Image (cartoon, helix red, strand yellow):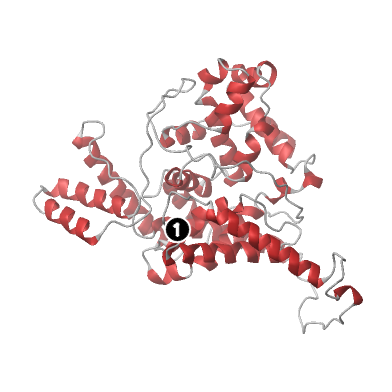
């Protein structure tokens, strides 16, 4: 049995708004640590490898490791594992092999702690959240398992909160056979016609296919005409089509493919072959849960309500004001760069178009495992993104600041998340909600 706080999912779904901007392919990566409020230094991003290294390279690395001391062996083994799972190994970037070894040992300890927690019959989610929110070590199936545990908790809590409301439902029993109406003639133009729905479904499928071709084109895992790439795109297509069919009020909106990509990548690269074979089903379940947590943001009828996107953007503005009023005033009154101009995409797509996949996975570790909840932690990260480019924003006008925030620079992700974690909460929101 999983332990955790109650989570209420929205009861009302609405139509999504389209028109997301094209992804900036140059965004993402990591850089040097900066102090709060200082301008970030633009650095070259750490490479992200999408393909597994060849067995020849692995064997070569293994032979070199055999000649090292025991502690160095652990470091080399961890580097090889990182490279094997799509990340570049760290080879004394800061000039200190001792620090690199310490980080490797810390990662091993964290991996052991997570493996212990998820092996328990009754998982202590608070402890698991605390460990995972600091980053899940690469390799094995830890990230896939932890993400599924956290999202399964959301599903269980949603079920429990709605169980009473559905107790007297009359949905059980045989299906009712409906007669075919005149509207269902193939030439009927009525929106209720099954033929109209069929052609609408075809249009959505074509849009999904176009968007999947543009999903992380730099990675062979998603792109290319190999059987490998086609297989993954087909699975993602199935997930998005099924979601569209089951949610006719929402359907599919450009950008959903970007939200699905991290989930599918993590689950399909699980080292447990049985788990990996279920990546499509697991991705669908978790994708639905993620969108259910923020679906009101996409409902135009709710834009001006307390649960709509404008309310959430207002919370982001209030959070910035509570932590740096100088920057808030500059954006609101001097350069007049409103949160709607940049925050809509940040929030609705969970930052998937602002960073590369490697950075997204690390950010999502903190979002999914945050005790504040996904949306609250997301707002903290968005606010931290503003604070980390404060000096550039203060010196910029409307055009410069808008370009900066719509094409966010490369930063040190760990520093960004630490800034987000240390923010002062917007207490006015909690007073209003209570």
Residue at (71, 65) in percent of width and height = 201
Residue count near mark 1 (Cα–Cα under 10 Å), binned few <14, some 14–19, many ≥20: some
Whether residue 427 is visible: no
Residue at (58, 63) in percent of width and height = 237
Residue at (66, 32) in percent of width and height = 341
| Nearer the observer, 423 or 414 | 414
Image coordinates of residue 421 in percent, x first then y, are 50, 35
Residue 47 sits above or below residue 329 on the image: below
Name which quarter of the figure residue 221 lies in: bottom left
Residue 54 sits above or below residue 331 on the image: below
Name which quarter of the figure residue 189 lies in: bottom right
Whether residue 114 is visible: yes
Image coordinates of residue 12 in percent, x first then y, are 77, 55
Residue at (86, 80) in percent of width and height = 180
Q: Is residue 200 left or right of residue 129?
A: right
Label 1, secondary structure: give it.
Answer: loop
Number of numbered markers: 1
Q: Is residue 221 left or right of residue 88?
A: right
Q: Is residue 413 left or right of residue 286?
A: left
Quadrant that contains the C terminus:
top right
| Residue that protrudes farthest toward the left in the picture | 67
Image coordinates of residue 336 in percent, x first then y, are 68, 21
Image coordinates of residue 265 in percent, x first then y, are 46, 57
Circle 1 residue: 224
């Amino acid at each position: 049995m999983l332990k955790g706080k109650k989570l209420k999912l929205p009861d009302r779904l609405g139509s999504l708004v389209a028109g997301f901007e094209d992804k900036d392919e140059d965004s993402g990566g990591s850089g040097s640590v900066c102090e709060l409020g200082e301008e970030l230094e633009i650095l070259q991003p750490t490479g992200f490898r999408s393909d597994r290294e060849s067995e020849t390279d692995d064997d070569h690395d293994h032979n070199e490791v055999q000649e090292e001391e025991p502690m160095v062996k652990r470091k080399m083994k961890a580097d090889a594992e990182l490279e094997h799972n799509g990340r570049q190994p760290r080879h004394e970037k800061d000039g200190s092999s001792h620090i690199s070894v310490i980080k490797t040992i810390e990662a091993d300890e964290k991996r052991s702690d997570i493996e212990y927690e998820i092996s328990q019959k009754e998982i202590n989610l608070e402890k698991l959240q605390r460990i995972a929110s600091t980053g899940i070590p690469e390799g094995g199936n830890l990230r896939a398992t932890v993400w599924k545990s956290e999202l399964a908790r959301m599903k269980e809590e949603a079920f429990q909160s709605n169980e009473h409301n559905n107790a007297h439902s009359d949905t059980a029993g045989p299906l009712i056979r409906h007669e075919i109406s005149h509207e269902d003639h193939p030439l009927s133009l009525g929106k209720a016609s099954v033929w109209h729905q069929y052609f609408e479904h075809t249009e959505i499928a074509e849009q999904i296919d176009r968007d999947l071709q543009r999903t992380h084109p730099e990675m062979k895992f998603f792109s290319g005409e190999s059987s490998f790439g086609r297989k993954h795109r087909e699975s993602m297509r199935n997930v998005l089509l099924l979601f569209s069919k089951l949610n006719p009020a929402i359907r599919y909106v450009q950008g959903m493919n970007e939200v699905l990509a991290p989930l599918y990548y993590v689950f399909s690269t699980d080292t447990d072959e049985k788990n990996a074979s279920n990546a499509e089903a697991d991705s669908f379940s978790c994708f639905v849960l993620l969108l259910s947590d923020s679906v009101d943001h996409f409902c135009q009828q709710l834009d001006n309500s307390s649960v709509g996107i404008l309310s959430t953007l207002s919370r982001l503005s209030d959070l910035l004001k509570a932590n740096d009023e100088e920057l808030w005033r500059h954006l609101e009154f001097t350069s007049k760069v409103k949160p709607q101009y940049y925050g809509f995409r940040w929030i609705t797509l969970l930052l998937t178009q602002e960073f590369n996949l490697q950075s997204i996975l690390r950010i999502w570790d903190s979002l999914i495992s945050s005790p504040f909840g996904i949306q609250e932690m997301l707002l903290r990260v968005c606010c931290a993104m503003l604070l980390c480019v404060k000096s550039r924003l203060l010196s910029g006008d409307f055009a410069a600041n808008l370009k900066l925030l719509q094409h966010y620079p490369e930063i040190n992700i760990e520093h960004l998340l630490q800034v987000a974690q240390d923010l002062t909460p917007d207490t006015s929101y909690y007073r209003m909600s209570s």
